[in-house]
Image (spheres, grey):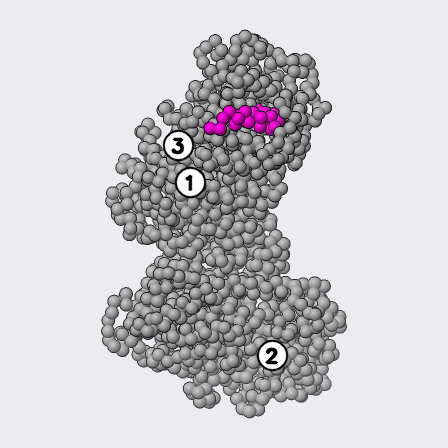
């Protein structure tokens, strides 16, 4: 029997989100034994991966990362968390509402963690179309400076086009904290997500204002008149002035429209009633302060107008091109005013520990005037010009509004590239009275008056007052006059050459203004001048990098950041270094003297520890890695992080990892030891906290095993690692509020990104990041710290994926209902914790589609299918176009038998993403399973013979042999996917043995084989291996060599111990290691089982199996549970061989039906059977019989691979049998570990396994024609492997394994022992005829006596268009015949009837009879009613063929393909069913057709020769009647049903295989030659 269930890869993953541009090469994915599509936790290498499917390693995608309750200055808990999880979670499924003990229905529960708002940042609809399109592809937000004036809110500097989108501090959070009331809406006056954070700590005279965003009263007036009085805001649509960049209120006005001012009740423009032209002349400082405030109010007004336009639905999409507002200079007159009036909030805040402590902290001094109604106080000096309560240094006086206008100095201005910009003067049309009351003076009026005052004072200074000119340029730009703004800046640039090239603020503002006028080249030139002259002027750097990214010049942006890093790095302290993990062992052996900075011996390293005394001095601030003020560390961190993202998009994972590491080190203040030092500190501290001990009591080396923590413990990581409050040392001088929050957020995301790259590297062998030591413990440490800095659903998702991949030791067997008392310990700890992290992630964002999808996949893996489906449905509800969730949902409901629903979900997945290979292939398989062939098309290969008849979109047939025939439809897409993926797979492992890796590899092979090669042999092998370099299949050759050498090591150990009597240390038998540069290959989307019905060539079928085998080998050889040495060989047989049978199908399954008596029939003087059941008992009779009759039976369903392997070794198994192959439930990793000297496969999978861990297939010459074998057949030592590699260029062969050729058939049948009538009295032929006729009349009472029943009882997926067309032609030629099919599944009935009417006629279609599937006993009994069983040539009947022949029904088959065993098994079974005489063999051959035409003619011939006796009881004559009589009367003597003889032959094969292994002989085994053919009666 061969299971009629598809294989779902045990191992296959990543890369990130299938619908996004950059994700596909970096996500992990995996096929699971339980049949889920894809996923992510054991990785697909980046070079082969097509699409991720099940579990997804997520980059950050714009979600809100929420602070934890009770947190410190940077989001770390101070008071600790109560044990909400550990205290009551003996069953970690219970927090999810899951009763793991019974697998029944359950609900998804309420969360244990406080849910956070789902605030995902959306793209501005008004972004530049080209930028927007690119961003939408990436689901990213634009790269903009944290010190830009633009049209959205502050959330810190973030880069453009992030492959892993950095987290952004929600602007709602920022404003809620800073302002204490309703936050500013997202789309306000700052660009993207960024506003000014002007305090950069510059010491130059042109340094910026401290914390402009925080300081400015941006929302001071929105809650009153502005919101309540729409008439007081700018209500007209913006024009397209300045090339579509965001205009000022002036450019928003139509020429004839009235000006409606914004009302400001809380402050006036003037003080003391003095007129503007009063003799009391203000100082420059006061004018600058007034102008600065006017500029802020002007931008606030723009924001208010924009908000109202959007609320009214009148915003113009053409007006929102990204615009950069120039930054004003630092105004010293404001300094003292910013030292007071720091607002506090009663609401919990991440920063409240700093807000309430009265200290001279400079960050605190910078945060001024952020309250909702706080005014600027004490601006200016104590002179007679001091301000009044309105905050302005000038007396109030009504101004004639008709005097308010913009004066242009020039009619035009020409840029450096010859571009002419519009400079036409624009007057302000004002309406209303001749004077505007002070209380209603609008922001534009203030700005114009301030501009006039600035112009006057600058003129008086003879145009030498630089700050005044900078402010004038800013105000002109804000008033919608960029040309005049350029004039102001040009005054500065014209002062003298020395100042021209050093006044970088002017250069940057000049560039920003040029960009607003579409002068891109000039803007870039001026920004570059600024950056080259002063790399530490990060304002210009950020502008330039943002501009280059917007132009899709990613590499240029990276080069700029590299230049800045190189220029500013403190070379006296830091030498240029590579990725630190590339050269440091992950086991901690090189850091035994590790000493951590910022150690606090008094800090309590316990979870939920006491609050630290905030009055204690903070840890010392460490010097930055760069020559910049500490307050700028956040901005440098963001630039480096942006570089990492950009390198990631460019495919440079090593460079990206290096950048992310550098960013983390900046924040952590690490000066030596690199990221390894940080990881080790995290591990040591967490271990101390977990064990409740002091650090002094622990070894300084980090723990070797992962520290497994539930979420409530993990989020305390930062507080423990950076006591007292979790504040990152490198960010201690970053200003509080939004800048600090953004820096912490970026640090968290750098940790997430770095961990994700390491995780990819771990899965693919380390090549992705240039290091070989990546492991779970290191990656978890980074994730824990990231999560503790910002609570991110994406981080929780990735931790869940990682934890689910941990395979725990299982030395103590556990039942299905046993659970760990602690979620981080015991068997299944990884899975239990993974469930907690998915649940925790959903508590942060209950609309996170990826978390629901991954949770569903994990639940499906642990056999909670109903709840898994609910999770998939929730994911689809959150994102109806999420292709991965749709495909997984389709797979899951298909497992429930809901084929129609599955097809609908597959169609939606394909519609969402037509390139999603898993969805395309899943849809094709689902449609084929119900014979829905419209649109199937077909492939034209092998002159049309491979896939003869195609089906068009309208259901019509097309001949592949017709002139001009071409491939088409979804079958073409499936085959193209296979061809593409196999071609991609050829490059797997290219250059894996470069440099030292080659010498290491050769030493391993030499040691494994014998350890004493001669120089000539060493050089010969070296030359051979060197020739593989850069050639196809290099990786496959390496793995084959490793596995063959390992086999020889086992043989050497056997010889040493049992032949020579020599005892050697285990190191003598160490296993060759997989080169660290060799990735783990992905498996093609079309699985080995799917090749049964897919029109593929011999080479394609073989390569698909090989790729699956290689993936399993690589994954296993890298597994933590695998012993470093080969497993010890068993003692010689004494007297019997110990044979182990591993299967998931020792239940009510076709394999058990066919083999249930085998294990007890073994002659225990020759063979003792050991059965290892990898699924729980279903209490069926079949399971009970196998358990009772097997000499040794293990219920190993709960065992991990290590325990199962150890039991096999302890049992001394000589030969291990794989009864699954590539079918669901397979434990192929056990075979890849090689626990037995000889390993075989049969009965589970009808084809090659293509793997070195399968030595023999049991087959016969019908099922496996000798011409399908690889030429090299010895398969003993390394030299054989080298010779076999030379055969790889031949595409005609399929089987590399040695074949044991059975004497009759390899197929085992137990019908003589277990068929329904096997225990009854044997009927005579006449009695059988009457019994058969009685059943026919009962089943088909309406059939006439002379009608002939043709039948097929296979699942409908085995039928394809060519076969169905042949059946219809047979029916059309035989008016007396009917065709009996099963509703298997029932959805196929309507499809086949419809096609029959289209291809033949309604009359022919009416003669197709469908019945329901029957239980096994009834199925066998009623098979006798059929007159002729028409087999399916593409994929034969297997178990069904044996059932039919036992009933006596003749079977007509066609072994269509030599390279597909599945299409030849019925012929093998048939030839063993007949008497082994010349006449019997001729009879069998007459039922084995040679071609499609022969199949059709033979069926018609047999039916026409059958004649029923009129009025009789089933008596008939003809060839069919004679064949039926022979089959029925011979079944008690048939070799097919002689199970005892079959077992005896198998024992012969076992003994011969063992003899050859001991004697170092290879080759195929022919039992006919070994033992003369004879029929044995029992």
| Magenta stretch holds residue 1125 | no
Q: Which of 668 and 1409 is in front in this view?
A: 668
Find the distance from the CA under tag 1 to the CA under tag 2: 71 Å
x and y percent of residue 1578 in the render?
45, 86
The answer to which of marks 3 and 1 sits earlier in the sequence is 1
Read off the magenta span: 474-498
Judged from this view, the residue extending furthest toward the front is: 497
Q: Which residue is drawn at 47% across and 70% down?
A: 1249
Q: Where is residue 381 in the image (x, y as percent from the top left)?
A: 45, 14
Q: Which mark is residue 629?
A: 3
Residue 22 visible in the snapshot: yes
Question: Are circles 3 and 1 on residues that touch, CB within 8 Å?
Answer: no
- In the rendered structure, the answer to whether residue 1540 lies left or right of residue 980 reads left
N-term mark: 1 or 2: 1
- Count every numbered label the image shows and give the total: 3
Q: Mostly what secondary structure, the magenta segment?
A: helix
Numbered circle sitting on residue 565 = 1
Q: How far apart are marks 3 and 1 (CA)?
A: 14 Å
């Amino acid at each position: 029997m061969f299971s009629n269930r598809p294989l779902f890869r045990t191992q296959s993953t990543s890369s990130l989100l299938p619908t996004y541009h950059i994700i596909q090469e970096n996500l992990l994915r995996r096929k699971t034994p339980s049949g889920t599509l894809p996923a992510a936790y054991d990785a697909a290498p980046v070079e082969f991966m097509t699409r991720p499917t099940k579990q997804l390693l997520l980059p950050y995608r714009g979600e809100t990362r929420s602070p934890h309750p009770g947190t410190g200055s940077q989001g770390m808990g101070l008071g600790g968390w109560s044990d909400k999880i550990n205290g009551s979670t003996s069953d970690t499924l219970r927090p999810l509402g899951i009763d793991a003990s019974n697998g029944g229905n359950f609900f998804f529960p309420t969360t244990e963690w406080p849910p956070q708002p789902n605030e995902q940042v959306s793209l501005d609809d008004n972004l530049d179309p080209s930028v927007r399109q690119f961003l939408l592809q990436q689901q990213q937000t634009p790269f903009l400076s944290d010190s830009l004036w633009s049209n959205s809110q502050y959330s810190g500097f973030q880069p453009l086009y992030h492959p892993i989108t950095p987290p952004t501090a929600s602007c709602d959070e920022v404003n809620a904290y800073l302002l204490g009331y309703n936050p500013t809406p997202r789309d306000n006056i700052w660009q993207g997500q960024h506003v000014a954070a002007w305090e950069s700590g510059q010491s130059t005279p042109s340094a910026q204002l401290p914390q402009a965003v925080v300081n400015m009263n941006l929302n001071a007036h929105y809650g009153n008149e502005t919101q309540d009085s729409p008439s007081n805001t700018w209500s007209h649509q913006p024009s397209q002035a300045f090339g579509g960049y965001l205009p000022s209120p002036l450019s928003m006005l139509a020429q004839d429209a009235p000006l409606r001012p914004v009302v400001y009740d809380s402050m006036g423009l003037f003080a003391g009633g003095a007129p503007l032209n009063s003799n009391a002349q203000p100082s420059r400082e006061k004018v600058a302060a007034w102008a600065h405030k006017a500029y802020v109010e002007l931008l606030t007004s723009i924001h208010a107008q924009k908000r109202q336009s959007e609320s009214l639905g009148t915003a113009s999409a053409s007006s929102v091109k990204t615009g950069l507002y120039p930054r004003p200079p630092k105004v010293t007159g404001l300094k003292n005013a910013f030292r007071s009036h720091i607002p506090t909030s009663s609401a919990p805040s991440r920063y409240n520990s700093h807000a309430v402590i009265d200290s001279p902290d400079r960050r605190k001094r910078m945060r001024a005037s952020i309250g909702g109604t706080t005014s600027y106080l004490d601006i200016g000096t104590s002179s007679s010009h001091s301000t009044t309560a309105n905050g302005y240094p000038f007396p109030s006086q009504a101004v004639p509004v008709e005097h308010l206008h913009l004066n242009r100095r020039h009619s035009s201005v020409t840029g450096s590239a010859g571009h002419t910009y519009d400079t036409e003067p624009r007057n302000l049309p004002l309406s209303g009275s001749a004077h505007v009351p002070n209380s209603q003076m609008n922001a534009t009026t203030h700005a114009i008056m301030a501009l006039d005052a600035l112009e006057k004072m600058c003129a008086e200074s003879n145009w030498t007052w630089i700050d005044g000119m900078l402010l004038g340029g800013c105000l002109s730009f804000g008033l919608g006059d960029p040309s005049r703004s350029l004039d102001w800046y040009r005054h500065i640039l014209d002062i003298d050459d020395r100042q021209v090239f050093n006044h970088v603020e002017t250069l940057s503002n000049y560039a920003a203004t040029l960009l607003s006028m579409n002068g891109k080249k000039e803007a870039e030139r001026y920004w570059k001048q600024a950056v080259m002259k002063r790399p530490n002027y990060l304002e210009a750097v950020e502008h330039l990098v943002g501009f280059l990214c917007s132009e899709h010049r990613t590499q240029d942006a990276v080069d700029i950041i590299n230049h800045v890093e190189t220029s500013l790095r403190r070379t006296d302290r830091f030498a240029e270094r590579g990725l630190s993990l590339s050269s440091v062992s992950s086991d901690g052996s090189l850091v035994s003297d590790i000493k951590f900075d910022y150690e606090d011996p008094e800090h309590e390293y316990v979870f939920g520890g006491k609050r630290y005394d905030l009055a204690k001095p903070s840890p010392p601030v460490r010097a930055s890695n760069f020559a910049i003020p500490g307050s700028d560390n956040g901005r440098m961190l963001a630039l480096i992080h942006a570089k990492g993202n950009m390198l990631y998009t460019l495919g440079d994972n090593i460079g990206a990892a290096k950048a992310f590491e550098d960013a983390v080190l900046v924040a952590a203040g690490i000066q030596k030891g690199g990221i390894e030092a940080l990881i080790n500190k995290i591990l040591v501290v967490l271990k101390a906290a977990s064990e409740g001990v002091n650090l002094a009591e622990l070894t300084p080396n980090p723990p070797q095993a992962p520290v497994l923590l539930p979420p409530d413990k993990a989020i305390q990581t930062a507080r423990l690692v950076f006591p007292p409050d979790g504040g990152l040392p490198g960010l201690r001088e970053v200003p509080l509020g939004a800048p600090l929050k953004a820096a912490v957020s970026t640090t968290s995301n750098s940790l997430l990104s770095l961990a994700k790259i390491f995780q990819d590297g771990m899965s693919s062998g380390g090549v992705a990041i240039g290091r070989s030591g990546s492991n779970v413990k290191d990656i978890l440490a980074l994730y824990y710290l990231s999560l503790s800095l910002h609570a991110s659903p994406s981080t929780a998702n990735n931790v869940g994926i990682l934890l689910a991949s941990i395979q725990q030791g299982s030395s103590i067997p556990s039942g299905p209902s046993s659970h760990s008392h602690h979620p981080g310990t015991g068997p299944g700890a990884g899975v239990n914790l993974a469930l907690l992290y998915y649940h925790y992630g959903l508590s942060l964002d209950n609309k996170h589609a990826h978390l629901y999808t991954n949770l569903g996949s994990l639940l499906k893996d642990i056999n909670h299918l109903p709840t898994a489906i609910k999770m998939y449905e929730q994911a689809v509800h959150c994102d109806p176009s999420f292709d991965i969730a749709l495909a997984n949902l389709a797979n899951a409901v298909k497992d429930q038998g809901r084929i129609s629903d599955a097809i609908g979900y597959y169609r939606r997945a394909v519609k969402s993403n037509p390139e999603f290979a898993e969805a395309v292939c899943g849809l094709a398989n689902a449609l084929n399973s119900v014979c829905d062939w419209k649109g199937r098309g077909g492939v034209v290969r092998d002159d049309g013979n491979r896939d003869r008849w195609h089906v068009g979109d309208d259901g019509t047939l097309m001949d592949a042999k017709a002139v001009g025939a071409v491939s088409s439809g979804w079958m073409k897409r499936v085959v193209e996917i296979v061809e593409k993926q196999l071609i991609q797979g050829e490059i797997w492992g290219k250059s894996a043995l470069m440099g030292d890796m080659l010498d290491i590899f050769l030493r391993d092979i030499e040691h494994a084989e014998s350890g004493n090669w001669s120089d000539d042999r060493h050089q010969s092998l070296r030359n051979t291996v060197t020739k593989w370099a850069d050639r196809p299949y290099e990786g496959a050759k390496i793995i084959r060599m490793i596995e063959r050498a390992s086999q020889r090591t086992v043989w050497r150990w056997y010889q040493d111990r049992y032949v020579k009597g020599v005892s050697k240390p285990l190191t003598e038998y160490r296993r060759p290691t997989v080169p660290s540069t060799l990735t783990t290959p992905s498996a093609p989307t079309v699985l080995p089982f799917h090749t049964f019905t897919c029109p593929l060539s011999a080479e394609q079928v073989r390569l698909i199996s090989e790729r699956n085998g290689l993936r399993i080998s690589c994954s296993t050889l890298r597994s933590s549970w695998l012993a470093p040495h080969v497993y010890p060989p068993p003692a010689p047989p004494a007297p019997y061989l110990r044979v182990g049978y591993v299967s998931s199908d020792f239940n009510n399954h076709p394999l058990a039906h066919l083999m249930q008596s085998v294990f007890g029939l073994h002659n225990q003087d020759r063979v003792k059977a050991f059965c290892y059941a990898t699924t729980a008992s279903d209490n069926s009779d079949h399971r009970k019989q196998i358990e009772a009759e097997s000499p040794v039976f293990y219920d190993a369903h709960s065992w991990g691979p290590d325990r199962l392997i150890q039991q096999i070794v302890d049992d001394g198994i000589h030969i291990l049998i794989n009864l699954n192959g590539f079918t669901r439930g397979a434990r192929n990793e056990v075979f890849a570990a090689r626990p037995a000297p000889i390993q075989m496969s049969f009965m589970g999978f009808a084809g090659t396994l293509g793997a070195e861990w399968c030595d023999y297939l049991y087959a016969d010459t019908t099922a496996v024609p000798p011409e399908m074998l690889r030429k090299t057949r010895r398969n003993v030592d390394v030299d054989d492997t080298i010779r076999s590699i030379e055969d790889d260029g031949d595409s005609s062969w399929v089987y590399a394994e040695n074949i044991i050729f059975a004497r009759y058939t390899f197929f085992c049948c137990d019908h003589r022992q277990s068929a329904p009538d096997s225990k009854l009295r044997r009927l005579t032929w006449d009695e059988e005829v009457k019994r058969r006729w009685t059943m026919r009349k009962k089943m088909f009472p309406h059939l006439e006596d002379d009608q002939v029943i043709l039948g097929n009882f296979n699942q409908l997926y085995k039928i394809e268009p060519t076969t169905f067309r042949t059946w219809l032609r047979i029916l059309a030629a035989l008016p007396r015949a009917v065709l009996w099919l099963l509703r298997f599944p029932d959805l196929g009935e309507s499809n086949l009837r419809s096609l029959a009417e289209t291809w033949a006629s309604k009359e022919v279609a009416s003669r197709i009879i469908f019945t329901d599937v029957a239980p096994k006993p009834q199925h066998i009994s009623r098979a006798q009613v059929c007159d002729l069983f028409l087999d399916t040539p593409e994929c034969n009947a297997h178990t069904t063929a044996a059932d039919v022949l036992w009933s006596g029904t003749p079977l007509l088959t066609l072994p269509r393909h030599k390279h597909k065993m599945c299409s030849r098994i019925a012929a093998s079974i048939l030839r063993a069913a007949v008497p082994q005489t010349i006449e019997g063999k001729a009879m069998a051959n007459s039922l084995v057709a040679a071609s499609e035409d022969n199949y059709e003619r033979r069926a018609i011939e047999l039916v026409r020769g059958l004649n029923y006796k009129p009025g009789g009881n089933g008596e008939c004559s003809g060839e069919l009647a004679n064949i039926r009589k022979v089959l029925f009367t011979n079944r008690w003597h048939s070799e097919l049903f002689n199970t005892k003889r079959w077992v005896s032959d198998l024992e012969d094969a076992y003994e011969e295989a063992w003899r050859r292994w001991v004697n170092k002989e290879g080759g195929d085994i022919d039992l006919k030659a070994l033992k003369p053919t004879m029929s044995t009666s029992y």
